[in-house]
Image (spheres, grey):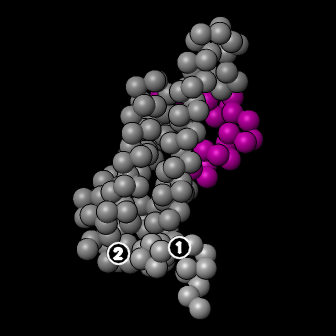
Amino acid sequence: MNTSLSYGLDSNTSQIRRGVPFPIQLMILFLAFDACERLGEMIWVAWEATHALEPPSTPYRAPVPVTMLWIVVDVLLPVLLLLRTHAGRWLTQMIFTIHLLYMAHVFVIKHPYLWLYMGSWGRAKLVSTLVIDGCFVAYLFSQRAKTYLNR
């Protein structure tokens, strides 16, 4: 009995899905979650502006054009990773590195006091994001990532 048909999956689709390395799947999941989170932030900003709500608990929020740019990037990068292009790997490395540098710039140079205003959850989220970004950049420099992404 063909198990792929019993689950309703096309054998070609299951082959493609099995071929994607786990770290690439994590990157795609991370980028999708980040895009959803930023989209929710944009909706909240619009809601806040029309309903005159209280200021948010976090003292700093990225400017709207920057948030919109990150949403577009969060959607573009998984597509490039799934297309397995050489440029997609380099662009993904570059974007994760830019994100690391942007966070360092905001929290070290531009607004160093923000760390004091953050709660435990915000600090944990920030540190984990930086660690995850660093791990993704390191993986994209690995030979395994080069072999898979550079067809």
Q: Position of residue 92 (x, y in %)?
A: 36, 55
Residues in magenta?
110-130
Q: Amino acid at mark 2?
A: Tyr
Q: Is residue 55 left or right of residue 13?
A: right
Q: Position of residue 7 (x, y in %)?
A: 61, 75
Q: Position of residue 136 (x, y in %)?
A: 46, 61
Q: Which mark is residue 9?
A: 1
| Residue beneath the point at 53% across and 27% down | 42
Which element is circle 1 on?
A: loop
Q: Is residue 142 left or right of residue 4?
A: left
- The residue that label 2 is drawn on is 148
- Residue at the limit of the structure toward the bottom, as seen here: 1
Task: Give the foreground label among 2 and 1.
Answer: 1
In the image, 15 versus 35, the foreground residue is: 15
Q: Is residue 129 magenta?
A: yes
Q: Residues within 10 Å of mark 1 (few under 14, many from 20)?
A: few
Q: Is residue 150 visible?
A: yes
Q: Residues within 10 Å of mark 2 (few under 14, many from 20)?
A: some
Q: Position of residue 12 (x, y in %)?
A: 42, 77
Quick check: 74 above or below 82? above
Q: Is residue 10 magenta?
A: no
In the image, 87 versus 12, the foreground residue is: 12
| Residue beneath the point at 67% across and 15% down | 55
